[in-house]
Each structure stands twice: as structure tokens, then as C-alpha cells.
Image (tube, helix red, strand yellow):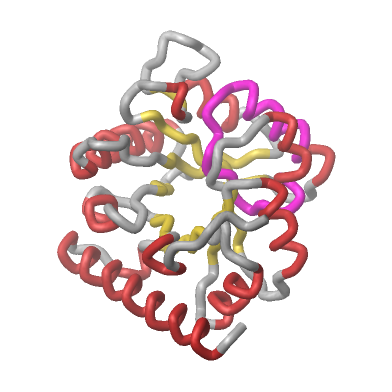
Amino acid sequence: MTDERRAQLAAALDAVRRRIARACADAGRRPDDVTLVAVTKNYPAADVQALAELGVTDVGENKDQEAAAKWSAVTAPLRWHYVGRLQRNKAGSVVRYADVVQSVDSVRLAGALDRAAGRHRTTPLDVLVQVSLDGDAQRGGAVIDGADPERDLWRVAEAVAASETLRLRGVMAVAPMNADPDRAFAILHDVASRLNGHHPGADAISAGMSGDLEQAVAHGATHVRIGTSLLGMRKTLR
């Protein structure tokens, strides 16, 4: 880790934190109510370690092999979020290092994580149900009031809530491409309120990335997932 790279990360982190603080002020919220999840995919473990030393507490990854390697390499205490699409055959690996899986979008995936967590964990795995905001389950996300019971949002949430090894914590979503993020996150907020009404502990809303964190905070996001604005552009790790 060069001094130049550390200075870049420190400056970017300060800028992101100031954006979150301004967004919270505009929404009448406290900055402490919004957790920054640094999405470190395609960046080296050294960057993750440096961010931790700068005060970052939560990191997100979206590829199992890369995430597992970084988790083994980084010594700082961090809360690890798996934020990418997850195949059921990777569940046994992910539950070993992830503190949170934000991308559960099917009943079968919830079942796979339940079984894997029962084998490999002594504490419950926190889970967010990923919500499809445009109804296209092919792009990931459980469908609100969906016709397919396997991918229906409420059935997925109930499958998680019924598990003894998983803990339903809330919802996650990505604003659809070319959609108005303000409208998209308003829908997510309504879904989150409905879910929280049935499951009082499920109060987390993970929404907002580098381009739309302000709109997400305005609609109640408790977690924002920031990659590019924090770490810059980088080619895929080999």
C-alpha cells in the first residue's frame, strides 16, 4: 500500500461521508443511522485493510472466491456483506465468512443457506431479501406479490423468518437501469414498511450506490453500498 493510495482512499472516504451527512440533513435524519458498506469487489485486500484502518466497519463483496480470499487475508475486524447474486452451491462457502447475505431472492436459496448455516455456523446469519423493483426476476430479486411462489417476495421472507439459523433483517434493492431512483426507492420503502409490520426485527433497508445514495437516504436507507466513489475504477482482479 503506497502513501498515495492511502491518501486517495482517505480523501474519497471523507467525500462519501460528507455526501451521506448532507443527504441525512436534507432528509431530517442522523448520519449515524446510515451504515456505509464499502463494496470492495475487484480491489485488493490491501485496500480493504486500509479502509478498515480509516474507520470503515462494513465491506461488501459479490463473488465468493474473491470474498473468501480477502476475508482470510484481512486482519481488521470487519462486518462482511455478500451483496452479489448467489448460487445455491456456493452457500456452504459464503456462510463461513459472511455476516450478512443481502441477496436472497428465492425460497430455494433461503433453504440452501439455512442448511449450510446449520452445518458451519454457531450464530444466526443475517439475511436481507433482495427485491426486484421492476418485476423482472431474471435480473435478480424476489418479485413483489409475484405469481411464482419460489420467487415471491413474501414467501421468500417467510422462508427466512421460519429458519432457526437465519435472521431476517430487512430488504435490499438496486434501482433498475434507466429508472428514476427516487421512484424506485419509494417503492422499496413501502415494501420495507410492509415487511417490518409483520417482522419487527426486519428494519434494514440496503439501497443506494455511488450514483443514487442521496435518493436512497431520502427514502429511509439504513445501508448504502458504495464502490466507485470510494475506490475508483479498477480492472477485474485475476
Closest to the observer, 199 or 153: 153
Q: Where is residue 9 in the image (x, y as percent from the top left)?
A: 46, 78
The verdict on residue 103 being magenta is: yes
Q: Position of residue 131 (x, y in %)?
A: 41, 32
Question: 185 left or right of 79?
Answer: left
As drawn, 226 above or below 153: below
- The quarter holding residue 147 reads top left
Residue situated furthest left in the rendering: 26
Question: 216 left or right of 115?
Answer: left
The quadrant the C terminus occupies is bottom right
The quadrant the N terminus occupies is bottom right
Magenta-highlighted residues:
95-117
Closest to the observer, 199 or 150: 150
Residue at image position (30%, 37%) is 177
Residue at image position (65%, 69%) is 45
Residue situated furthest top in the rendering: 147
Residue at image position (57%, 42%) is 127
The verdict on residue 4 being magenta is: no
Closest to the observer, 211 or 203: 211
Residue 151 visible, this orientation:
yes
Residue at image position (64%, 53%) is 99
Residue 153 visible, this orientation:
no
